[in-house]
Amino acid sequence: MKKYKLTFELVPEECWHANLRSMLSQEQWDLIRKDAYRRAGYKCRICGRGNTRLEAHEKWSYDERKGLQKLEDVLALCKDCHQVKHISRTQLIGRGNDAMEHFMRVNECTQSDFHAELRRANEEYIRRNKIENWVTDISWLKDKFNF
């Protein structure tokens, strides 16, 4: 299996509403996202694009055995990389082809590679959706920001 710099992150449906912005105050979220931008040197953490508006992306890991969704980091991403991360939503709003082009450019790969990786991500998504009662761990916030 190829290792890609830019990947898809399909969140299990049960975890869709476990996002930081819904859990935190606007002031806390602003602190977190601005810290992510600063740590990235105000450039996209994936493609390296600077001089662009950045977006904060929550990086989660999933322990399927334990049913645990764990916050690992908040990353500064450009809009194009962020749209690839959330490919399902991006396709719904009609930007799927743009996301595919960006994925291929960043990963220096073919359209076949894009589709194979998307297939793999969808298989992971289907498997994770069979797990019920996911637990969300945001201890990263406590360790980094004391809240």
Image: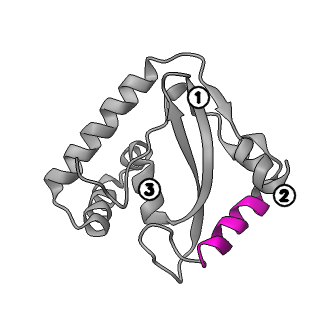
Residue at (59% x, 23% y) in the render: 134
Q: Using the numbered discs, state the Cα–Cα distance from disc 3 to disc 1 in whole angstroms.
A: 24 Å
Check the image and report above or below for 44 versus 137.
Answer: below
Q: Which residue is mark 3?
A: 83
Residues 24 and 133: in front is: 133
Q: Using the numbered discs, state the Cα–Cα distance from disc 1 to disc 2 in whole angstroms.
A: 27 Å
Q: Earlier in the sequence, mark 1 or mark 2?
A: 2
The amino acid type of the residue labelled 3 equals Gln
Tell whether 142 sits left or right of 93. right
The amino acid type of the residue labelled 1 equals Leu
Q: In terms of secondary structure, where does tag 3 sit?
A: helix
Residue 123 in the magenta stretch? The answer is no
Q: Which residue is mark 2?
A: 27
Residues 45 and 95: in front is: 45
Q: Magenta span covers which residues?
A: 30-41
Residue 52 in picture, x, y percent from top left: 53, 78
Local crowd size for mark 2, using a 10 Å CA cut-off: few (<14), some (14–19), many (≥20)? few
Residue at (43% x, 52% y) in the render: 85
Q: Which residue is mark 1?
A: 68
Q: In terms of secondary structure, where does tag 1 sit?
A: strand
Q: Which mark is residue 22?
A: none
